[in-house]
Each structure stands twice: as C-alpha cells, then as structure tokens.
Amino acid sequence: MENTHHGESPSPDTPAPQQKNGKTDEQTIALTKARLAIDEVDAQIVELLKTRAQWVHEVGRIKKADNSPIFVPERETALLGKLNRLNAGVLPESSLQAIYREIISCSFFLEGGLTIAYLGPKGTWSHQAALKQFGKSCELIPCQSFKDVFDMVDRGKAQYGVVPIENSSEGSVTAVMDLFVTSSLKICAQINLNIRNSLMAAIPREHIRILYSHPQVLGQTRDWILRRYPNAELVETSSTTKASILAKENAAMGAASLGCPLAAELFGLNILEEDVQDQACNTTRFAVIGRQDTRPSGRDRTSLLIRIQHKPGTLAEVIDCFQRHGINLIRIESRPSKAINWEYVFHIDAVGHALESPLRETLEELEQHCSMLKILGSYADTDVV
Ligand SMILES: O=C(O)C(=O)C[C@]1(C(=O)O)C=C[C@@H](O)C=C1
C-alpha cells in the first residue's frame, strides 16, 4: 500500500487520504477483509455442496434399486418451503429459490440425468419455464408442437414435458387441454412463470408494419397493439421464437416480434420496448407432464377431467358434491369432447390431493355422477417465484 495512514480515522475537517481507486486505506482494508471472509464462506459452501452431492448419490442409488423417479416434486416443495422459513426474508426469496433450483438440477445430473421436452425452438416461454423448474443441468429437447411434447414423453424419449395450461389474462391453452383427453400422462407439478413480453425488431420502431407472435401473446398484448400499432398486420406463429426468426428475416418488410426477450439475443434483434403485456402481472401456469403420481405436499391442487350424462341437473349434482364436502373449486371449463358433436368434457381444478380427505371421498362419490372421471394429477399449488 502506498499510503502511510495507519489506524486512526481522519478528523471530520481533514479529508481522508484517497488512493488511486478512490478508496481510503481503511476502506481498502475493510474491503480486503470482507472479501477474505467471503472466500472462506465460499470454500465452506463448496465443501458442503460436495457433501450434499455424496448424499444425493446415495439417494440415487436407493432409487435406482426400486426404479423410483429421480424427480420428486413433493420433496422439492417441502425442501424449498423449509429453506424459505430458515431464510426468514433475509435473502430475496426468488434468489434463494433460483440457487436451489440449480443445486437440485445438479442432483438430477448426479442421479443419472433428466430429459425434458418443451415447445421450442430455444427462447420460447416454455423453454424459460423448463429452465425455471429443471435448471441448467438437464437435457432440454425443443419440440415443434404441444402434441410432439406429449408424444416424446409418451414414447419415453423424454421423462417429462413442460406445457402451458393457462394464462392469467388469456385463459386456457385449449390445444394443450384437449391433448389431456386422450393422453394417459399425468400432471406431476406446476410452474408459474411471470410473462413479460418485449417488442423486438432489427429496424427502428417507426418502420414497423408487421407484428409476429404466438396467438397467446397477441392476446396478452391486444390493447397495447391497438394503442401503439393499430394499423400493423398481425401474423400468428407457432412459437414466439419463430416470430423473432421471421422478424429478423423480414426486417426489410417492416417486421417485428412480440415475445420473450431472450429471443432478441439469440436472433440479433433489438429490444425496442419491454413489458408490453396489457396485464402487469401476466402469468402463465405450465404443467410438468410425466408418468408418475405426486405425493401430497400439504398445499395441493387436483386437476380432473369429467364427462357427464346429458340429463337435467347432472352438472348441479357434480358441483353439489364438491360443496357438500367443503371443497373449493378453483376452475371449471368445458371443451368439446371431439368424439360426439355438442358433447362436452369438463376440466375441473379443485383444492386438495386425490389421496387425502376430503377430496378422496368426494371423488369416490363423484364417480356415480360421471360417465368418465379422469384424475389428471394432484400436485403442489405453490406459487414459486
Ligand atoms: O430427495 C430426493 O429424492 C433427491 O433426489 C434429492 C433432491 C435434492 O437435491 O434435494 C433432488 C431431486 C428431487 O426432485 C428432490 C430432492
């Protein structure tokens, strides 16, 4: 150190001697000390992570013996809940969760690895949701359609798939809901993702004539489009990433895209405006689909698919069944059965786990009123940030 100042603080009227980097000797010493302490803590963290990895290996070995799944959502819900309580709000909850998501992602790798299918290409909101749930140590496979995501899991090419079910402003993703009618796959977990769409283009905003996006995002930004680009041609694409590819290719025609800002980086576009969605807390609920049943977490939701007879009062009997058992219905939607014209199936989400009272008894009773009752899955209804 060049400066000869030792120990005592300078009096208020004597300016503290400054070093070249703009810090006093005391500040430099304090900074060095703090960084040494951080180094020490980091060394301990790595040692603890190594010990954790040994235990994860052990868990993996036990699971392999009875062929039980690597991904155990209910255990993760319990673990993350416990960590939040230990943290007591000191670290931002979302930061702690993101750190642990990557630690758990590393566990998947240590236990043999996971393959996850999602609607691609890279850079879609489904890609973001898959990363949020499964982290960077899993193999993520982009698919061309929601049907392909279901097929990949069905054929065992991926252990899990990530598909959007509903958006807080646009409602259900009907193409996905309809796939559940014929599929035997289960909903094992849900992912809530805050959807913050951006306007992206390779041209200045005043040259924009065409807006590309997925129909869901065009719906989420409807009012914004009417205000800002009332005369633009709106073109629907199979994904938001495809929209950004087309915005780049057709820049000379005045093309821009709406969607996940990650696409701008991937395809050389500029982000012209952020947060263009009409609803500030625009959120999409994604489902993790797979073959396993998830055990109760204490805060569960159950998704059901029912078909009822065309008789007066049948739907009222179904609703009454939930009411008598004191079960809160979160969502009820009808969709064409696609088997017979004007016949419908109902998608119902209820609070509780199918294996636990009072939902267990409700479902037993409900069977008498339905010509078909399919439990799509019981899973933690946590709003993981
Ligand atoms: O407890 C398990 O079953 C594990 O495999 C460990 C672990 C973890 O890293 O904590 C990893 C994956 C599971 O989804 C849940 C927890």
Image: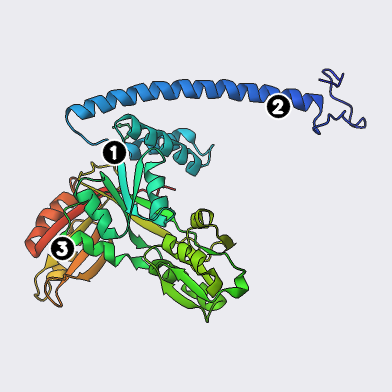
Dot 1, how many residues are within 10 Å of its Cα: few (below 14), some (14-19), or many (20+)?
many
Q: Residue 106: image x %, image y %?
A: 38, 33
**What quarter of the picture does the N terminus occupy?**
top right
Query: The residue under label 2 is which amino acid type?
Result: Leu
Q: Which is more N-terminal, label 2 or label 1? A: 2
Q: CA distance from mark 1 to mark 2?
A: 42 Å
Residue 147: quarter of image: bottom left
Q: Secondary structure at mark 1?
A: loop
Q: Residue at x 27, y 62 (%)?
A: 176
**Residue, disc 2:** 31
In the image, residue 53 sits, relative to residue 239, either above or below, namely above
Ligand 1 has an atom within 8 Å of the beta carbon of the residue at disc 1:
yes
Q: Depth check: 300 or 143 in front?
A: 143
Q: What residue would you read off at disc 1?
A: 71
Q: Residue at x 38, y 36 (%)?
A: 105
User: Where is mark 3, residue-wise?
Assistant: 306
Q: CA distance from mark 2 to mark 3?
A: 63 Å
Q: Residue at x 35, y 42 (%)?
A: 139
Q: Amino acid at mark 1?
A: Phe
Left or right of 144 on screen, residue 278: right
Query: Residue 143 location in percent, x, y?
Result: 32, 55
Q: Is residue 318 above or below residue 194?
A: below
Q: Which percent across, then down, holds residue 123?
A: 44, 54
Task: Give the secondary structure at mark 3.
Answer: strand
